[in-house]
Image (spheres, rainbow, N blue to C red):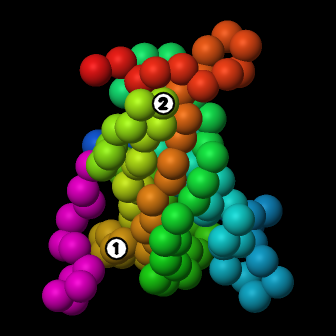
Amino acid sequence: MSTPSTPAKPTGDPAIRTLAMPADTNPNGDIFGGWLLAQMDIGGGVVAVARAGGRAATIAVDAMTFLKPVQVGDIVSVYAEVVHVGRTSLKVRVQAWAKRARGDLEELVTEGTFTYVAIDENRRPRPVPA
């Protein structure tokens, strides 16, 4: 179910899908936010590398919003889309959706904007292709 501020379906391209496991939990039994952040960075990175035409490194994470907890057994899907391209950097909007282990409900659980810089073989910034 969605509310006026929550989209009914993901935006962007599917980047990764993974299963939330017991080893990924915090002391409260929910999935640790750092684990979810890492999955989102991987998904955003997949899209950034494709658009940059080569290596890209994360340089910032902006506007992270944890909306709902992820639980053990949920299937987490990360969707990402490039929303801005600069000379050497790009901003990628990333959403994490969870398909609940018990039922067919899939809902937005976390969203944020990640900034990546295109890098060359010497790990120096390089222009993003037009």
- Look at discs 2 and 1 and give the one toward the viewer: 2
Q: Which residues are magenta?
A: 1-12
Residue 58, which numbered label? none
| Residue at x 40% of width, y 61% of height | 95
| Residue at x 75% of width, y 88% of height | 28
The amino acid type, in three-letter code, at marker 1 is Glu
The residue lying furthest to the right in this view is 27
Q: Is residue 24 left or right of residue 99?
A: right
Disc 1, SS: strand
- Choose the circle earlier in sequence order: 2 or 1: 2
* Nearer to me, 115 or 49: 115
Q: Position of residue 42 (x, y in %)?
A: 57, 43
Q: Quadrant of the N terminus?
A: bottom left
Asked if residue 14 can be seen in this view, the reply is: no
Where 120 sits versus 47, above or below?
above
Where 22 sits versus 105, above or below?
above
| Residue at x 41% of width, y 24% of height | 128
Q: Position of residue 123 (x, y in %)?
A: 71, 21
Residue underneath mark 1: 107
Q: Main secondary structure of the magenta part?
A: loop
* Nearer to me, 107 or 53: 53
The residue lying furthest to the front in this view is 87
Asked if residue 123 can be seen in this view, the reply is: yes
Residue underneath mark 2: 88
Label 2 close to label 1 by CB (< 8 Å): no
Alpha carbon distance from label 2 to label 1:
33 Å
